[in-house]
Each structure stands twice: as C-alpha cells, then as structure tokens.
Image: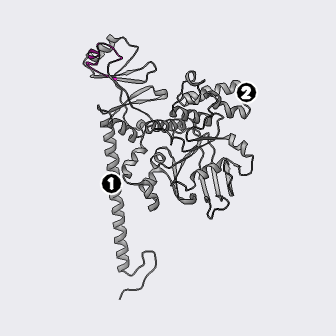
Amino acid sequence: MPETTASGAGIALEHLTKRYPGTPAPAVDDVSMEIKPGETVILVGPSGCGKSTTLKMINRLIEPTSGTIRIGDEDVTGIDPVGLRRKVGYAIQSSGLFPHMTVAQNIALVPKMVGWKKAKVDSRVEEMLDLVGLDPREFHGRYPRQLSGGQQQRVGVARALAADPPVLLMDEPFGAVDPITRDHLQDELIRLQHELRKTIVFVTHDFDEAIKLGDRIAVLREHSHIAQFDTPEAILTNPADDFVSGFVGAGAALKRLNLTRVRDVGVVDFPTASVEDPLQSIFDLLRSGTTNEVLLLDRHRRPYKWLRRGDLMRAKGSLARAGTLVHDTVTRDATLRDALEAVLTDNAGRVAVTGRRGAYIGVVDMETLMNNVHDLLEADRIDALEHRHELEEQRARHTRLAQEGVDPAGGAHGVKA
C-alpha cells in the first residue's frame, strides 16, 4: 500500500458469538480480531463456517448474541443499527441494486438518507461513477437491467462508498460474474483502495482471490474459529497447520504470482496509432521498418486492434476489416498470474496494460513475465533449501543432546555412565 493517510477506521471484534435458537452449536463462537485502519482483511473458509455471519454482525445485519464490536473508538454494539448501517458501506454478490431506480438514484440513496444537500449528492454521484471507471454521461440515467454484470458490481461498490464511510464490508461481491470480469473488478478494487484507504472486510471462498486482495487473511474453521490470521505471503510460506495447508493447496510457489503486480515489473511502450489517424499515416508507420505491428487505439485511447504489416493491404485499406481485435487487457494492479494467463492465450505473447477507464499505458510481454516467474521459483527453491538445512541442524542438535543425556527442551535425563 502507498504511504498515504488511511481514511478507514479500526475494527475490533471482542469475543463475538452468534447462537441461533434450537441449534446445538453456535454459528460463530467467541471470535476476537483486530483490524487496522485502512487495512483490507479477507475472511476465507469452507462453506458454512460462519464467515458471512461474522461479517454481517459488524454492521448488525445479524445481531450478535454476545460480544463487542468497536469501530474506531465507538462501541457500536448498543447503538441504533439503522444509523450504524448508514455509516458502513456494504457490497454484496449480484450488486443488490434496486431495479426500479437509475444508476444515479441507487448511488445517491445513502447520501440522501443522511441528509446531504442535493448539489452535494449530485456531485458525489458523478465523482463515484468516475471513480469506478464508468462515464457519468453514459451511465447516470441507466437502469440496472441495462448494465452488464461487471458494470452492476461497479455501481454496487460506488453506492457502498457514496456516503464516504470509513468501513466497507464486502460479501463475495464478485462471485456471480465471469472470470475475466472478476479479475478486472478485483484490479479495480485494488486501485480504489490505493486511492481511498478504507478499512475493508471481504468475505470469499476463493483462496486465490484472498491472496490477491488481502493485506491480511483470516483462515476460518467451523464456527469462525481462526486457524491463522496473517499476511498472504506468511500463510503461503508458513501455513499454521494441515487445515490451512489444505486451503493453500498445491503450487504455493506459483500462487505467489498473486503477490506481485504488473506495476512492479517492466511495462514497455509499444507503437500505437488511433482510429482517428489518417489511414495513410498508419500505413506509413507500418511500412517504415521500425515496427512489424502497431496497437490501434479507439477514440478513448483504449486498446482496440493489433495491426500487422499487410493487414491494411489484405483488408483493402479498411480499418473495419483489418487487424485482430484486442480480446484481453490487464491493469497495472493485475497480478503476474493474471498477466501470465492473458499472455499465454495470445499468439504473439504480449498483453496491453490499461489504466483509468481502460486507457492504454503500455505492454507486458512473455519474456518479462517468465523472468519474474523464474526469480520467484528460484527464491522459493533457496527458501526450501534453507528451511531443510535448519531442520537438519535441529535434528543433529537433538541427537547430540540426547547422546549426552540432556533433554533438548531443557534439563538432564541423567549422567551417562
């Protein structure tokens, strides 16, 4: 995270428990957790372990049976729950937008409820749409049914953030969209968090998503018992027990690709042209001998087509029929895993990198990615060797002490004859 001031508030869960009548065991049992201001904490665990129940108790959509919830310096366990929910952003799977309201009306809902003036509300709606990468002029008056699943989720996040809450709760918000859209929504959330520094508590069943998004991950057993609460890297390299290892799964080294971002590796420039450029200038650029290919950008500077030499000739000088459409892009906040998957599906072994509203930034290629993968695997190999060496030294020490009649834990078994 960048060194900016966090606008989020700390959260403390103290001995939080939820019991439902008629059930022998609590759904959530004596959970205590400290979440720092501006931190993204992921709750991950098997279905039915109580992670969503724990999340919903924070804004008291579910009332705790016992325990305390603190947001900032305030104990929110006993205050008006409706007022509390207006101070805490909440985003859920399938966005939860009101279908009879426009995009603008959905986003404006909570600011109006808390008494903001119309001019401030209108300004905030425009700001929020821009923040989540949607053109206010295009989306302001649309209804949810007129949006794609990914666009609905963006509006859902914009609505959750509209009243500038210090805390954002997210309950599997990207679980209902396709994998490519999901990757882009995750990248968007990372970018937003760089700018806003809210305190985010995020529920998912997807451990790869947890690694990608979390500053820290709480791996939960049944009844929300915490098996391990640590950074993604610490959990990948030192899982606390077999239960956590099961969540990490095979290929921990490759999962570390989710810890490195495209912005951390070499993004190179690439020859570009615009659909608004004269055809002759594009043709001259391709014939100049300095490049075999250009990336054609649309009117908003978004990647549109890859154009090679001869494409214009074969298409008889028409951009409509020339080149290959850009099917996939990654953002600067995408992980190396996202970029590697995109590059592997591209015949030329490269992918365009985009910024706000999909505007072109550069290109990342296979050579750059494979060099980074090699470095990660080599680092893991060295770590494994060091760990093995430490274990061997430990065993040798225990053997030596045992031969000398000394308990390795301290104390003597007796003097050797």
Give the amino acid at mark 2.
Answer: Lys
Would residue 318 be counted in the magenta stretch? yes
Where, quadrant-wise, is the C terminus in this rendering?
A: bottom left
Mark 2 or 1: in front is 2
The correct choice, above or below, for 142 with respect to 388 in the image is: above
| Dot placed on the residue nearer the N-terminal end, 2 or 1 | 2
User: Is the residue 6 above or below the residue 252 in the image?
Assistant: above
Tell me if 74 is positioned left or right of 379 in this view: right
Q: CA distance from mark 2 to mark 1?
A: 60 Å
**Pointer 1 residue:** 382
Picture coordinates of residue 72 (x, y %)? Answer: 67, 47
- SS for callout 1: helix
- Residue 225 shows in the view: no
Q: Is residue 147 left or right of residue 162?
A: left
Which of the 4 quarters of the picture holds residue 139? top right
Label 1 neighbour load within 10 Å: few <14, some 14-19, many 20+: few
Front-lying residue, 161 or 383: 161
Label 2 close to label 1 by CB (< 8 Å):
no
Q: Which residue is mark 2?
A: 117
Q: Amino acid at mark 1?
A: Ile
* Residue extent of the magenta highlight: 306-320
Return the x and y of residue 393 as percentages of the image width and height. Answer: 35, 67
Identify the residue at image location x=72%, y=46%: 81
Residue 237 in which image quadrant: bottom left
Question: Residue 342: percent from the left, percent from the top?
Answer: 36, 36
Is 80 on the left or on the right of 53, as rendered? Answer: right
> Compared with residue 133, is residue 287 higher up or lower down, i.e. above or below?
above
Q: Is residue 73 left or right of residue 296?
A: right
Residue 151 within the segment the image draws in magenta: no
Which of the two residues, 92 or 264, is positioned nearer the viewer here?
Answer: 92
